[in-house]
Amino acid sequence: MTGYSDIAKKAARAAGQLLREHYGGAQKVDAFEDHDIKLHLDVRCQELIAGIILESFPEHTILGEEGNAGGESGEFQWVVDPIDGTVNYFYGIPHFCVSIALRRGSGEDWMLGVIYDPMMDELWAVEAGGKPTLNGAPIQASKRGEMAQAVVTVGFSKTKASMAAGFERYRQIVGQVRKSRMMGSAALAMAYIACGRLDAYIEEVISLWDIAAGRMLVEAAGGSVELVASPIDPGKLSICAWNGKLPLHGTLA
């Protein structure tokens, strides 16, 4: 699987370099939405990632936030978020990343995950059955087992219904934990859980490409991830990811 992993890392770093080169400059905006921004750079980064992957594996499929590419029924599917944290990027907040995962087929046979933070030059990587790493060094989730010890990040999605549900869940947990954070990147939230910086992450409505690589990292690092179909937004997911020690099983029920 090394060949796949090497290509994923190469693609993530290449997209990250493009993001660094344009960081802080004027951005071409494809669309302003109520609670989101679509940058032309999102499209450019995904095209760059897809080009690197498909050059080596032309029969593979790219499933991404900015559309699909490659073979329509490829056995191997690369799930890509070219900029997770686009609003942060647009506003000059240096907390965003590139997320790439690979699976065989369209189910749960996940093969690898890579998350790259170009501003910190931090690259998380994991292969199925292997140990997760940060810049090549092994990592593991925190051992904090009490909510009063925990630092938890909560994401709020883009519709009134999802934000209302998110606020209610936030209200339920905020008084139990040491601190809560809202950071703006689902993939980095999960990477941070995998290396022990954060203890849990919850969001009511999220897309597969936001959390595919992060889920592999968290679980390989000893953490737990619960995913259910979003009751608010059909086709999307609700997620609770944590270090595996906090009493959060069934949080999404």
Image: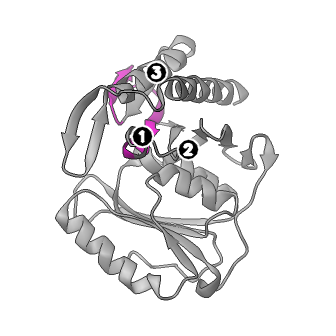
Q: Residue furthest front?
A: 25
Which residue bears the numbered disc 2? 110
**SS label for mark 3:** helix
Please give the name of the residue rendered at 32% of the width and 25% of the height, measured from the top-left corner: 40
Residue 88 lies within the magenta run: no
Residue at the image position 40 percent from the left and 48 percent from the top: 208
Residue 50 shows which numbered tag?
Answer: 3
Q: Quadrant of the C terminus?
A: bottom left
Q: Quadrant of the N terminus?
A: top right
Mark 1 crowd level (few <14, some 14–19, many ≥20, 10 Å Cα): few
Badge 2 amino acid: Trp
Query: In percent of the image, x 27 and y 30: which residue is there?
Result: 29
Whole-percent x and y of residue 157? 30, 59
For the residue pair 223 and 77, the one nearer the viewer reads as 223
Q: Is residue 83 left or right of residue 216?
A: left
Q: Amino acid at mark 1?
A: Ser
